[in-house]
Amino acid sequence: MAQAVTQTTPIKTVNPPRAVPVANPERALQILSKTIYKELRENGYEPKQIVALATEIISLVTTDLGPLD
């Protein structure tokens, strides 16, 4: 019985993005927040859903920070 030969393509490794220093991080976060909010609203998300998303993000950050003693 003949066997099929499978050719594999090597997997390219991608370097993780490096953090880019930002002159005004607070302003950058404000712009990012407004952009995300605008995109979500334009894609049909309701304010309650956006609040749920924000709550989940806060929960993840809180867990990541761990106990604050």
Image (cartoon, rainbow, N blue to C red):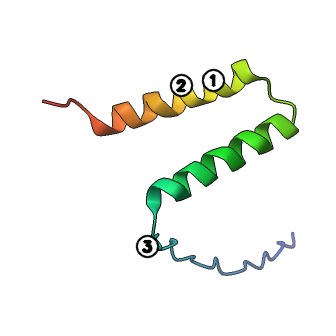
What amino acid is at disc 1?
Val
* In this picture, residue 64 sits left or right of residue 52: left
Q: Which residue is mark 1?
A: 51
Q: Is residue 17 above or below residue 41?
A: below
- Mark number displayed over residue 21: 3
Identify which residue is drawn at 62% across, 52% down. 32
Identify which residue is drawn at 63% across, 79% down. 12
Precedes in sequence: disc 3 or disc 2: 3
Circle 1 Cα neighbour tier, 10 Å, few/some/many (<14 / 14–19 / ≥20): few
Coordinates of residue 29 in the picture (x, y in percent): 53, 52
What amino acid is at disc 3?
Pro
Precedes in sequence: disc 1 or disc 3: 3
Identify which residue is drawn at 77% across, 38% down. 40
- Mark number displayed over residue 7: none
Which of labels 3 and 2 is toward the front? 3
Coordinates of residue 45 in the picture (x, y in percent): 80, 29
Identify which residue is drawn at 70% across, 18% down. 48
